[in-house]
Amino acid sequence: MSHQNVWIDQRHHLALARCRNAVPAIAVKELTSAINQHLAAEFQAGHTYLAMSIWLREKDLAGFSTYMHDKSQEERDHAARMIAYLVDSDEQVELPTIEAPERSWPSVQTLFDQVYDMEKGVTASINRLYAMAETVGERSATAMLDWFVAEQLQEEAEARFVRKRLRLAGDNSAALLLLDQQFLEGTALTHVKGGLSGTRGA
């Protein structure tokens, strides 16, 4: 083989190597884009939960209102956790545009039905991110998302529990007020939090 052919062959292999190395980089960029898109779900939930807290306060349901206010802050904290990951990974953060949430609900039951649906949506998004991270082999992303998987298990359990309690209360205003008082005292979800505390990360 001539020197010219060797040079051409080496250049060909170098080009192929660069293509192979570019695939993970492109995949990581796609994962970064997906994480940025997921931020919208976290911020939207936080914004919606704050609106719910306001509506519940207007209905003199201070316990439910406080709970939803805390959940609103949790969602913003979740977004901040992902933003920190992107920054620490030298990836670009793209803050999403958030739609104005609803301002009223037909009932407390309807409100918490929406909470449950939103948490299910967030969980599905987290699962998609996890699958992408595993496919790419991005261990730092899966390690970060492990916390979110455990967190969403808790979030869904809480939302499911509240929905069931509200269904049991039905149209009984005394039962609704009792549940509201339990939220105000911080005892409403003791059983749920205790049962899942071992699955959550620090």
Image (cartoon, grey):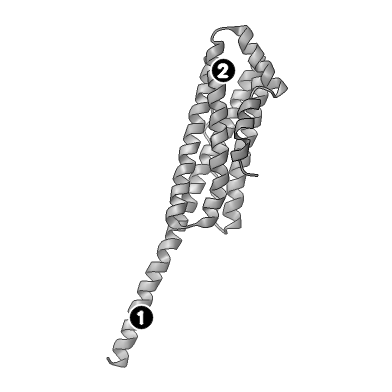
**Element on which disc 1 rests:** helix
**Percent from the top left, x then y, of residue 139?**
52, 56
Q: Which residue is mark 1?
A: 11
- How many dots with numbers? 2
Residue at the spot 64% in from the left edge and 31% down from the top edge: 194
* Numbered disc 2: secondary structure: helix
Image coordinates of residue 20 in percent, x first then y, are 38, 68
Q: Is residue 120 left or right of residue 51?
A: left
Q: Amino acid at mark 2?
A: Arg
Which mark identifies residue 45?
none
Picture quarter containing residue 151? top right
- Mark 2 nearby-residue class (10 Å; few <14, some 14–19, many ≥20): some
* Residue at the farthest left position: 1
What quarter of the picture does the C terminus occupy? top right
Marks 2 and 1: which is nearer the front? Answer: 2
Residue 141 higher or lower than 3, as above or below:
above
Q: Earlier in the sequence, mark 2 or mark 1?
A: 1
Give me the residue at 35% from left, 82% from top: 10
Q: Is residue 46 above or below residue 57?
A: below
Residue, far right: 185
In the rendered structure, the answer to whether residue 25 lies left or right of residue 193 reads left
Q: Is residue 74 visible?
A: yes
Q: Residue at x 56, y 11 (%)?
A: 169
- What residue does disc 2 label? 165
Location of the N terminus (image quadrant): bottom left
Q: CA distance from mark 2 to mark 1?
A: 68 Å
Amino acid tagged 1:
Arg
The answer to whether any part of residue 62 appears in the image is no
Q: In this view of the protein, which residue sits in the foreground, 177 or 149?
A: 149
